Image (cartoon, grey):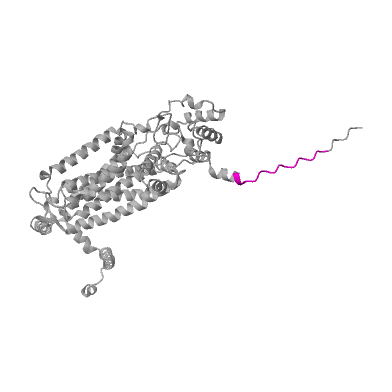
Amino acid sequence: MPEELNDKPADKSLKGKALEAYNWVEQRVQLQAPFEEAMLHPVPKSTASWWYVFGSAAATLLMLQIVTGILLALVYVPSGAEAWKSLQILNHDLPLGWFLRAMHGWGSNFMVAVVLIHMAQVFMFGAYKFPRELTWVVGVIMLLMTLGMAFTGQVLRFDQDSYWGLGIGASITSRIPIIGAPAVQLMLGGPIIAGATLTRFFALHVFVIPGLLLALTGLHIWMVVKLGINEWPMPGRRVNKKTYIREYHELTHKDGLPFMPGALWKDAVFSAAILLAVAVCAAIFGPYGPTGQPDPTIIQTVPKPDFFFLWLYAVLSYLPPALETPFLLTVPAVGIAILLALPFWAGEGEKSWHRRPVAVMVLALVAVSWGTFTHLATFTPWSPVMNAWSGANVPEKMTHNLSPVERQGAVILQSKQCRNCHALGGEGGQRGPALDDVATRLTEDQLIRQVVQGGGNMPAYGKSLTPSEVTALVKFLDTMHPANQPAATDASRAAVAANTPAAVPAPAAQAEPAPAKAQ
């Protein structure tokens, strides 16, 4: 502290003590200078526009999600047995618990929407061009993180929709070549959706993704401050890497203004309006779910994602089954790759949309397609391969010459609607493998384990079937093999049986002496 300040008489008022405390902290953290630099850095006057308010609104919504998320985490229990109940407690037992959940849920929807609008605005204004390439790349990653946070939040509701939504997500992940199965195991924390799955998604939703988003938001704002806010795109004002920075500083010097209050007040007003809109939606429409408790045996459900993934839901419902996997494995990856490569491919040239008709058409096509498929998803079924075949009977020829137990298994397969996911006789769902030759792929023990514990995309039915029902079902499935091909057997059992000495017959029991006749 300068010596002349120490010579002044100490101010004993409350204001003086507060100022003294502030100076003490500031001398040690020294944040005032960078904060003033951020608030007072010059920006082109044209950027003090309502078109530039979406980025700050997204940051405001992130803060809302973190605050409401911390409060919800005080009650939420991330376990398979308690997650659904803890949400019911929030909805019905705690004062304003429902409103807190509603603010968090609607805040998530608004955040996704605002981030998408911000990305579209940046694209249309050419703000990804030199020298803001990395700012755009970080923004794309933040968009993916925002979608990831929304998806993990939907899973934590742990109701019917979230259960089957996660099952669909696991199904999509399992289709990735080579790493699909390990990735599903890592995502679910085991072969089935259970408590370990919720623990992992809770960690992702509460710690990992918000932490990364905060770090990336700080980096994003840092680059915006250091590189300057993108100027209003004017036709003929082309980006040239050799001259752009000099031209930008000349523009801010001749026709600029400090960010605060010149542009900041519009950010503040819009952010306040967004928070008010979230609160109004929360008060009117209430929280999202939870719907019914997750029950893997109820597969007539029509799981639908939240609005940001509805377009994908609709696309998959209209695609032929054979094209689902190629679409899932290529289109999202190609789309992300294009977004990341965009600033390096088109880092110079015109920014104005008046001179970029292709960019305008691409954005319009994406927006119209997204809106159309989102609307279609409100009434289309999940997927052609998920159509219910519960009304179809087990083919009669498959019940000939069966034992009573095996026929009982056929009835159980019918009543539990296994054919919603598994085809039999060429008719049935294709979510799981066909059952016509399942006995050639799995031994009896493996069939029992699959039915009881589930695995991959199949839920566990151990708690939904009695032991006798499991036995009957597996006995019937064990008959599902071609006539000229035997059922699979456990080779280790045969080896053990071959090496086991023949059992030594037990000695005959010594005959007891006949009781003496009564005299």
Q: Is residue 447 above or below residue 2?
A: above
Q: Which stretch did the figure color magenta?
A: 498-512
> Is residue 501 found inside the magenta-colored segment of the image?
yes
Evaluate whether residue 111 shows in this view.
no
**Can residue 407 be seen?**
yes
Percent position of residue 28, x then y: 28, 68
**Vertical comparison of 208 with 463: above or below:** below
Residue ranking furthest to the right: 519
Residue lying furthest front in this view?
A: 484
**Horizontal side, residue 415 vs residue 403: left or right:** left
Residue 498 appears left or right of 97 = right
Locate residue 206, reporting x and y percent.
36, 50
Q: Is residue 301 left or right of residue 239?
A: right
Q: Is 418 above or below relative to 174? A: above
- Residue at 43% over, 25% down: 392
Q: Position of residue 467 (x, y in %)?
A: 55, 36
Q: Residue at x 30, y 52 (%)?
A: 213
Quarter of the image where the N terminus is located: bottom left
In-front residue for pair 124/339: 339
Q: Is residue 432 on the magenta stretch?
A: no
**Residue 283 pos. (x, y %):** 31, 39
